[in-house]
Image (spheres, rainbow, N blue to C red):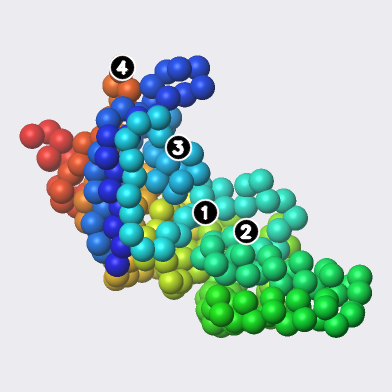
Amino acid sequence: MGHVDVAGVRYELPDGRVLLDDVSFRVGEGAKVALVGANGAGKTTLLRIIAGDVDPHAGAVTRSGGLGVMRQMVTQGNEGMDTHDLLLAVAPPRVRAAAARVEQAELAMMEAEDEKTQMRYAEALSEWADAGGYDIEVLWDVCTIAALGVSYDKAKYRDLTTLSGGEQKRLVLEALLRGPDEVLLLDEPDNFLDVAGKLWLEEWLRDSPKTVLFVSHDRQLMANAATRVVTVELGSAGNTVWTHPGGFSTYHQARRD
């Protein structure tokens, strides 16, 4: 399994204020780490830095293993998406790139069907196979059946506006937890899940060999799934972190001590 190392990370807001300063912690192989802190402390920004979405002003992030990311709002900025688009958005980069080439080749086939265009389409399909595209479609079938109760073929063109927030979250979680990525970043994965969904998430996190860093406000989820807790602590010169090496059940006593 993969790991994440955050070393001396500093991040400044556009107005020059320091949001994060000298942030360092490790998410070891197979660990389930809860990232907690006050609203606005920088938890989501820290996840974005680890994911590579934004660059820190100082420090470094190193990691091993494929990275899967769940955003807090899984469809934000992606209006008009269908189930296929959502699953593809959390697929490994090589699969996403191969899918884009297939789509381009299909569009070209609509314009012309000459031998050159057909060859490009065949090459795109070959790349899709080499990237594990057909294998991941089998995985997506398992995910849609588990999350939506229907096969992937029946669900793939379903507009996401017809899915509840809980169904969208469950579908993404199914894909990430069952998928090939060894390291997962989950921003409030329990939001919109019903009681049964939260219990399912707890069990999967607890039993999965994957390395997971997650943000949550759900005490039960943290108590049942987290193996350690990283707190983003407010500071006048920039927020730092404190790491509790145990689970959430001993977290508050450790804070008092």
Q: Nearer the viewer, residue 237 or 117?
A: 117
The amino acid type of the residue labelled 3 equals: Asp
Marking on residue 218: none
Does label 1 or label 3 sit earlier along the sequence? 3
- Using the numbered discs, state the Cα–Cα distance from disc 1 to disc 3 in whole angstroms: 30 Å
Q: Which residue is mark 4?
A: 236
Q: Secondary structure at mark 1?
A: loop
Q: Residues within 10 Å of mark 1 (few under 14, many from 20)?
A: some
- Residue 135: x and y in percent read 54, 82
Q: Label 3: how many residues lie within 10 Å, few (<14), some (14-19) or many (20+)? A: some
From the image, state whether disc 4 or disc 3 is nearer to you: 3
Camera-nearest label, 4 or 2: 4
Could you say which disc has been placed on residue 192 in the image? Answer: 1
Residue sitting at 56 percent across and 80 percent down? 130
* Label 4: which secondary element: loop
- Asked whether disc 1 touches disc 2, contact meaning CB atoms under 8 Å apart, the reply is yes
The part of the image, by quadrant, that contains residue 102 is: bottom right
Where residue 81 appears, as percent x and y from the top left, is 71, 58
Three-letter amino acid code of the residue under disc 4: Ser
- Helix, strand or loop status at disc 3: loop
Which quadrant of the rendered structure holds the N terminus? bottom left
- CA–CA distance in space, label 1 to label 4: 34 Å
